[in-house]
Amino acid sequence: MDLELANKIRSSAAYRELVRKRSRLGWTLTALVLIVYYGYVLLIAFNKDVLSAKLGAGVTTWGMPIGLFVIVFTVAITGFYVRRANSAYDELTDQIKREAV
C-alpha cells in the first residue's frame, strides 16, 4: 500500500468512525464475555453449593444449565459481532475504499 494512500485513509472521517465504533463494540463484548466467564469460574470456586443443587427430582444440577448458558452466550455474542461486522462495518469499509480511490 502506498504511504500517501494510507495517510489519506487514516485522515478520513469514515475511517475514524469505523475504528471508534468497532473498538467500542469490541471492548463492550469483551467485557461481557469476561464477566460471564469469570463469574461462572468464581461461582465454581466460591459457591459450589449453588451449582451442585439439584433441579427437581432428577440428576440435573444448576451447574449444567449455567455452564450451557456460558457456552451459548459466547456463541451468541460471536454471532452478534459477525452480523454487525457484515452490516455496519462493511458499509463503512466500502465507503472508505470509494473515498480513497
Image (cartoon, helix red, strand yellow):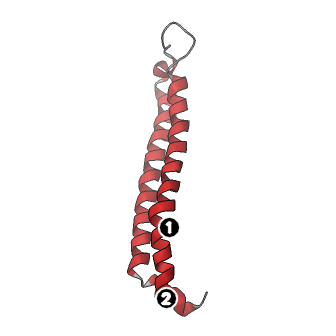
Residue 13's place in the image compared with 92, above or below, is below
Residue 56's place in the image compared with 37, above or below, is above
Q: Residue at x 50, y 40 (%)?
A: 73
Q: Earlier in the sequence, mark 2 or mark 1?
A: 2
> In terms of secondary structure, where does tag 2 sit?
helix
Residue closest to the eye, 50 or 88: 88
Looking at numbered disc 2 in the image, what kind of residue is underneath it?
Asn
Q: Residue at x 44, y 43 (%)?
A: 35
Question: Where residue 65 is drawn, which disc sits there?
Answer: none
Residue 86's place in the image compared with 39, above or below, is below
Q: Residue at x 49, y 34 (%)?
A: 40
Q: Residues within 10 Å of mark 2 (few under 14, many from 20)?
A: few
Residue closest to the eye, 5 or 54: 5
Q: Residue 5: x percent and y percent?
A: 53, 89
Q: Residue at x 46, y 77 (%)?
A: 95
Outermost residue on the bottom side: it is 4
Q: Residue 76: x percent and y percent?
A: 51, 43
Q: Which residue is mark 2?
A: 7
Quadrant in the picture for the N terminus: bottom right
Outermost residue on the top side: it is 57
In the image, 98: left or right of 17? right
Looking at numbered disc 1 in the image, what kind of residue is underneath it?
Asp
Q: CA–CA distance between discs 2 and 1?
A: 20 Å
> In terms of secondary structure, where does tag 1 sit?
helix
Q: Are marks 2 and 1 in contact (CB under 8 Å)?
A: no
Outermost residue on the right side: it is 1
Question: Where residue 90 is drawn, which disc sits there?
Answer: 1
Residue closest to the eye, 34 or 65: 65
Q: How many marks?
A: 2
Residue closest to the eye, 28 or 79: 79
